[in-house]
Image (spheres, grey):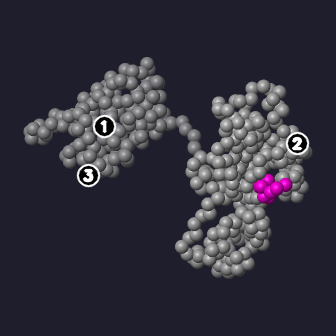
Amino acid sequence: MAKRFDGSQQALDLNNIRTDPDLVSHKIEVTLNRKTHMEAVITIIEENIPELTCLNLSNNRIHKLDELSELVAKVPNLKTLNLSHNEVRLSDRELDKVKGLKLVELWLNRNPLCLYFKDQASYISAVRQRFPRLLKLDGNDLPPPIGFDVETPTTIPPCKKHRKDIYCVCCRYYSIYDSGDRQPLLDAYHDGASLSLTTPYSTQNPSRSSLGEYHKDTRNLKRIKDTTMRFRLLKHTRLNVVAFINELPKTQHDIASFTVDVNTYTVIAVDGKSRDSTMAFSRVFVTVPAGGSGLCIVNDQLFIRMATTEEIRRAFVAPAPTPSSSPVPTLTAPQQEMLTAFSLKSGMNLEWSQKCLQDNEWDFNRAAQIFTQLKTDGHIPDVAFIK
């Protein structure tokens, strides 16, 4: 094979290799339409000339391209592949096995495969669908490929400016919701607000379910078919919404379990668990601006379901403290000073003090305000005060 390799072009010519005089004289048979023989050749290429850019496999009675799929990973720089005068048949799907190659030149002429296409245009189209960078097919130049620049997928960065606002809204809402009196929630809703409660669809007797207290008010559209009942179960106006909320069972939510997603600044999705360890919820608030920088709920969709075993296990379990309570060395000198001062003032250890400061962008006053609110509501675990 060394005699057939052109190092200046990084090209290997294996045309009609089975009749090579040197191999025949040594009674060595290389038949590339046999799986083991083709795999052996590809292994030799991978181990000795992985930078290969041109490979000629013409006149080798190759009828399937299964083994050639290994070229995609093992010979990633391959740009020219000659498969002419072989016996590749079936349909254009055979090309799917090597479509991962970044070819600019391909030879397929004199293969039964070419007879599959009704005309030259469909042939070129099918080949280019697999090899969009192809510039030459069977020795003929192709017109430049028409394409569009594809933008690199980007992740929308989190808006730190509004994160604290949304976090405060959720904390205030659920501190009231979990209190003995939910009436102050009137201030959270718009005059024309609406609320719907949904539980999972179930064919079993609702009264026997752990969600039985909620089933009578569920507006699950798979369960409620009557349009009049659907409308009646939708709570309208601020007074009716809060009156309904007051009738729901008492709860205590695990703030630490909350996942909050803000699709737009006016739509807040909250998922979490309540102290009743068998319950979990998903909630979507649609809001509008209300005076200053406040928000007012115009639509409230509450979904209550049974918690999974894993959710039950993790509910109301505080994270284990780290072995060291020393400040992270990467903090700046002012940040370390602020961390020490905040830890002394709050009584929390350095780990939790740093977390509070980081969540509030190292704004000492804002972090102190959030800390006071959470501590008052009983949402800071005891582990935060272990030093």
Asked whether 179 or 341 is in front, the reply is 179
Query: Which residue is painted at 82% across and 36% down in the image?
Result: 234
Element carrying mark 1: helix
Instruction: Measuring from the top left, give residue 119's x and y in whole percent.
Output: 44, 20
Residue topped by disc 2: 240
CA distance separating discs 1 and 3: 18 Å
Let me know if residue 289 appears in the view.
no
Query: Which residue is painted at 18% across and 37% down in the image?
Result: 30
Asked whether 106 or 219 is in front, the reply is 219
Using a 10 Å C-alpha cutoff, classify the residue at mark 2 as few (fewer than 14 neighbours), some (14 to 19) or many (20 or more).
some
Question: Mark 3 belongs to which amino acid?
Answer: Asn
Question: Mark 2 belongs to which amino acid?
Answer: Asn
Element carrying mark 2: helix
* Residue 186 numbered mark, or none: none
Q: Quadrant of residue 174?
A: bottom right
Instruction: Measuring from the top left, give residue 330's x and y in whole percent.
Output: 58, 74
Q: Earlier in the sequence, mark 2 or mark 3?
A: 3
Query: Which residue is painted at 72% across and 63% down in the image?
Result: 379
Residue topped by disc 1: 67
Let me know if residue 55 appears in the view.
yes
| Magenta region | 172-181
CA distance separating discs 2 and 1: 70 Å
Are the residues at dot 1 and dot 3 in contact (C-beta closer than 8 Å)? no
